[in-house]
Image (cartoon, rainbow, N blue to C red):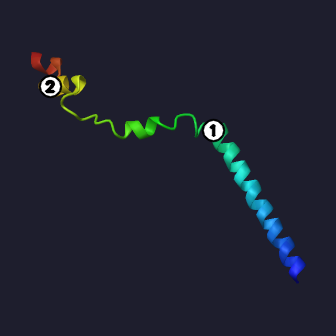
Amino acid sequence: MMASTLVYLLAMTSVFILLLVLGIFWAIKSGQFDDLEGPAQRILMDEDDPMLPKNEVAQTQPPESVSADSKLH
């Protein structure tokens, strides 16, 4: 009884280790570890800040909803 339980536990441990190794190699191959700091820094960037030059221009110019063709008629 004790030996069969030990064999079962060792087999299950081997399967989990194999899955872990395959998962790590898949993550490395698919580029999961290429840029570790980029997403962490991007979440801190405030893209709707009015002090940014590209947003300042967009807020000062009125949106052009009327096309040039409709102004002529």
In-front residue for pair 44/65 = 44
Which label was assigned to residue 12?
none
Front residue of 59 and 52: 52
In-front residue for pair 67/53: 53
What is the quadrant of residue 66 in the picture?
Answer: top left
Mark 1 vs mark 2, foreground winner is: 1
Query: Can you say which quadrant of the picture contains the C terminus?
Result: top left
Q: Does 41 appear above or below 4?
A: above
Dot 2 alpha-carbon crowd within 10 angstroms: few under 14, some 14 to 19, many 20 or more: few
Label 1 amino acid?
A: Ser
Q: Which mark is residue 30?
A: 1
Residue 2 visible within the image: yes
Tell me which residue sits at (34%, 39%) in the image. Answer: 44
Q: Position of residue 59 (x, y in %)?
A: 15, 28
Residue displayed at 70% across by 54% down: 20
Quadrant of residue 68 within the rendered picture: top left
Q: Indicate the position of residue 32 as horizontal and vertical percent values.
A: 58, 40
Label of residue 66 in the image: 2
